[in-house]
Amino acid sequence: MSSAATPATDPDHLWSVTEHLEDILATVHPLEPIELQLLDAQGCVLVEDVTVPLSLPPFDNSSMDGYAVRVADIAGASEEFPAVLTVVGDVAAGQAEQVQVGPGEAARIMTGAPLPPGAEAVVPVEWTDGGLGEGPVSGMRARSASPEGATGQVAVHRAAEARAHVRAKGSDVKAGDRALAAGTILGPPQIALLAAIGRASVRVRPRPRVVVLSTGSELIPPGGELATGQIYDSNSFALTAAARDAGAIAYRVGAVADDAETLRSTIDDQLVRADLVVTTGGVSVGAYDVVKEALESVGDEDEEGAGIEFRKLAMQPGKPQGFGTIGPDHIPLLALPGNPVSSYVSFEIFVRPAIRTLMGLTDVHRPTVTATLDAPKALTSPAGRRQYLRGSYAEGRVTPVGGAGSHLVAALAQADALIVIPEGVESAEPGTEVEVVLLG
Amino acid sequence: MSSAATPATDPDHLWSVTEHLEDILATVHPLEPIELQLLDAQGCVLVEDVTVPLSLPPFDNSSMDGYAVRVADIAGASEEFPAVLTVVGDVAAGQAEQVQVGPGEAARIMTGAPLPPGAEAVVPVEWTDGGLGEGPVSGMRARSASPEGATGQVAVHRAAEARAHVRAKGSDVKAGDRALAAGTILGPPQIALLAAIGRASVRVRPRPRVVVLSTGSELIPPGGELATGQIYDSNSFALTAAARDAGAIAYRVGAVADDAETLRSTIDDQLVRADLVVTTGGVSVGAYDVVKEALESVGDEDEEGAGIEFRKLAMQPGKPQGFGTIGPDHIPLLALPGNPVSSYVSFEIFVRPAIRTLMGLTDVHRPTVTATLDAPKALTSPAGRRQYLRGSYAEGRVTPVGGAGSHLVAALAQADALIVIPEGVESAEPGTEVEVVLLG
């Protein structure tokens, strides 16, 4: 999108939500991959196929605590007529010394320990007398307290087939298999697999760094004392939280006064740590709309794709919007309107998909469902505008919360959905089906 | 739960998953609330009702960029016969100086700026000539470039009723209203509201600090070189990631060798930063099961509720489990089995609800749905055990992924659901309905 290439010469032209979103997503590209430590890569998108370097398990091993035996030695064994074997030692997981199991012999073996040479199967300790010379036992005595358990004799009460209770080398994954495909989102189970195959770090798209700043000389930080005409800055808090919720590393710069030079230099300062800049306020038709004033002319006309374009959208709330790229690295910037509900809805519709595109995700939008409208009267919407009303969704039904006013932040806090009234619809009757965007 | 009060004298007794979970949730209590800065409280549970200290908006203000006027002055105005008013100044948001609007006068006003004394309504700038003496305009000239816009005359082309484009003081919330109820989870919209009413910090239950350690002399960290009989530690990575996913601040301690004394002193060292300790491995019936060995005797028999109890559960995977409290502060500790799939399933079924209970959430479990089993053959399950099989869920149908082996971490990484085969069921036929736990 370049204001030089496709100038929006008519300031009253209304762009559709779809057009604006398409322009944004055509400009924002997935971030360059970096190598991250496994736990730092949680929630990130893998950028390459990961191949298994070694088979898992890497060796035949026991799936039980018991005795490693030769099958012929225990054929026909029963509690009445047990097979009595000589215990030649312990095989514990991670133990260095090797034990060899010969005819008439057994090695006491722990879950996960390698099947020792000579042994063909494992009998669980519960199928034996545990070396105590009495009936079946329910477990082994601790090695530290009873070292003699690794010696003496054991009576085995049941036969077992070859490979019984043995996990074969490579039965989980084999060397050369593809463990995970490029594009996989790394959650706990994927991190489990990567660790299991020995990967300490992986190549992923990093979380985008999003700089959030609000503008307005009337804004003071929460906790302060309000003078006449002042209000608390809520947008920079809300959008920082929303950016984190979308998966970003978000920096809240806070509120900047309505002065174009201050705003421009604040943004310039922040570009070093930004993959995306989000501003609120100052984008409409007022005489103090400094975001528009400061950024409208940043585009280098000789440079394709640089510059911020301000538009009116066929959208309510959220009519005035700015978008483009800024600085020598062409960092994407979204300039949202300043009303709290307008900025929040704009974030959900435009910024969240941009963040998720930067992350390399393919599913960048909130889920939408069709729901039955549960309302005391028809919802009205201005002709030719796509309206987003706050709603509460449950089990296929949606109820409007609060009114259409873009300053109704109290109602927003009770909503968990946006009710979409399309451009061509001026009234949605109770009981009809409406499109609903599910938040959170 | 106290092993002194209700001793599990029969080591072979099988406890149900439900009994074990109930015992855990009866012992784990929500953390004591603390005051957190707004953005640090994201995702936390509010512990008190928050009352609105001041009405929002705090003053009557303009919802448009336009002119603040007296209604009588613009009665009957049209583009052909405009009402021409004297512009007495600008009213910008956050501006200190007051402007008074008298008969025949108008003040240029910006969105969010207080309605000046004398004015009764706002006409949008698009309903005027913007002071340029020509036709209707689409916006104001920037104050910085054209300061004369705050003076001169403006022609208004349409009448407006009293209060038109004015947001009334208190129309969003009124002082004394309840903004948010105790128990609310703080997402971006709730943070927006708290900031808007001036709250810089709130009283919430903090995120629990969860210490994760795996045990096993065979474990080496990913990235290292495997010697014979060694495998990579995956549990400490998987469960740290899973704890973060559940909302915790998780610390990965890593793998501890199978030595009871080392393990006990490692755990003791970590208690200072733990609201919950999770261990993996060493809980079964083997001679080297050091978690059991190190923790079985930590309970002070004179002290109600102290001590770790080890149980066999009617569960697959996940049969051996330990649970109790440890140290002078009675920190809850869950000792999970060491097989990667066992530990992950145990985390989902027992640890995640414990973490969410510590956070003060009431909805602590993963959502479950009923789904049609899509499988080439019947799924079998041992009698009297609740089995959790890995599955892939979509649109009301679930397909098993991989086999029942508890070491199949590769299959786990492809799953997004757990298929539950209840205790009383030994075979689930394709096409029948099964219970499914949705992960993630």
Image (tube, coloured by chain):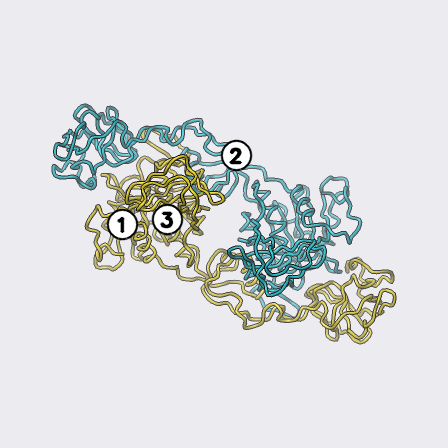
Chain colours: A cyan, B yellow
Question: What chain is tagged by disc 3?
Answer: B
Q: How many marks?
A: 3
On the same chain, marks 1 and 2? The answer is no
Instruction: Work out how far the residue at label 1 is from the one at label 2, CA to CA, in angstroms.
Output: 42 Å
* Mark 1: secondary structure: strand
Callout 3 amino acid: Ile
Q: Is residue A248 left or right of residue B114?
A: left
On the same chain, marks 1 and 3? The answer is yes
Question: What chain is tagged by disc 2?
Answer: A
Residues A397 and B56: in front is A397
Residue, x 24% and y 51% (percent of image)? B298
Residues A289 and B163: in front is B163
Q: Is residue A440 left or right of residue B120?
A: left
Q: Work out whether residue A140 can be spotted.
A: yes
Q: Earlier in the sequence, mark 1 or mark 3?
A: 1
| Residue A304: image location, x then y, percent | 73, 39
Q: Which of the labelled discs sits on residue B349, or is there none?
A: 3
* Mark 2: secondary structure: loop
* In this view, the mark in front (2 or 3): 3
Residue occupied by mark 2: A182
Residue occupied by mark 1: B15
Q: CB of mark 1 within 8 Å of CB of mark 3? A: no
Instruction: Work out how far the residue at label 1 is from the one at label 3, CA to CA, in angstroms.
Output: 14 Å
